[in-house]
Amino acid sequence: MRLACTEQLSRAARRRLHRAYADAVLRLRPDAVDTVAFHMTVSDDSRAPVFLRAAADRAAALYANDSACDYYRELVAHLDALDPAGAADARLAWGQVLRRAARYPEAEEVLHRALRDLTSAADHIGALRAAVSLAEVLGRAGRPLEGLAVLRAAPASKQSPAVDRAGLQLAIAALSFYAGHFDETASALRRAEQETARLPDAGRDPLLSRLFTIRAASLLVSGQVRESREAAEEALRTAERTEDAALLSSALSVVGELAREEGRSEAARDCARRAVSVARRTGDTTVLAFDQSNLAGAELLVGDHQRATALANAAVRLARSLGTSWALPYALVGLAEVELRCGRLAEADEALRECGDAVSLARDPQVLDGMRRLSEALAAARAAQPPTASQQR
């Protein structure tokens, strides 16, 4: 009946009806920004962009990534003709959510446009933030060297806020780590620490959590286990203070990997299970695939081969569904290890071959080291097998 009545109204009357409905909601339920944004958009109300931005930001804060992206897309469409500066800022926020949702090709396109527009507008702070976000997308898409090139051209200066200068150095540290440039990782982390020290306590914890997580991972790869544990524990403490799911997931991953390295199998499994649970909240499927692969390794360590196999295969399926990303090589190395430890040598060999193709772009040193180690173990396992009847003949 409502639809039939609506169809009898003129377009102008419909707009008036939606505007009146939006005003009523604003008066009675001002926090219902989603409803207000919808009715103002349909009615072509000039206030629509304000409420679209509020709805988008709230969805993003709740990790409702798809809803946030829809709102940002609608917002950009409204602002492109009316407010180019506002459109560029909205594109930056949109690209950041696309990155978190592992929609890397879309994120790259949106952030390239945001960077171009913000640079043209001489908005140096916005351009720096767009450059950092774009570089992080390229790193997550398995192209850390391209990301570092973007960061080298980023418009950073002493006039930029300390929080943005620290964010730039953390991005350099993370991408350098993915590229295997560990000396540059350490240097960038030191610079980030200096910038972070200038910030008030309230704004420091998110940056410190990222800093200690990257430092812990870098120290672990270089064999400095005790120093890595100290950094990882600080990363986890700081992430828990922020209550940020993405930061908490990253810190838990490193703490779990340390427990595996030290042979604390139950602790490793507990950490990995918690990391998977938190990763689901973020909506970042690459992080979820990575954490599922880590959990498979932890289950393998405690002897649950069936669960380890199921988790490793699920991680690979999820990573494959995303196209080119940093997570697929890690998931394939994890699957190869599970297959090898379960005695399925042919399947382990197949996973390693696919991993070789997947890692060819990024040449991630951690993945390459894992492949080398597993290839040697696979060769030893084959050599230890008794000869077949045809070989004996």
Image (cartoon, helix red, strand yellow):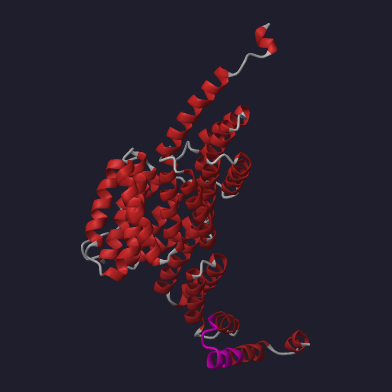
Decide if residue 295 is on the left or right side of residue 198: right
Q: Position of residue 35 (x, y in %)?
A: 58, 82
Q: Position of residue 112 (x, y in %)?
A: 43, 58
Q: Residue at x 61, y 90 (%)?
A: 21
Residue toward you, 72 or 195:
195
Q: Is residue 131 visible?
A: no
Q: Residue at x 62, y 15 (%)?
A: 386
Reply above or below: 355 against 203: above
Q: Residue at x 48, y 38 (%)?
A: 359
Q: Is residue 293 visible?
A: yes
Residue toward you, 243 or 319:
243
Q: Quadrant of the N terminus?
A: bottom right
The residue segment tinted magenta is 21-33
Q: Residue at x 59, y 85 (%)?
A: 43
- Quarter location, residue 387: top right
As for residue 26 lying within the magenta part, the answer is yes
As for residue 200 lying within the magenta part, the answer is no
Residue toward you, 42 or 61:
61
Residue farthest top in this picture: 393
Q: Position of residue 29 (x, y in %)?
A: 55, 89
Q: Position of residue 328 (x, y in %)?
A: 53, 43
Classified by dominant secondary structure, the portion drawn in magenta counts as helix
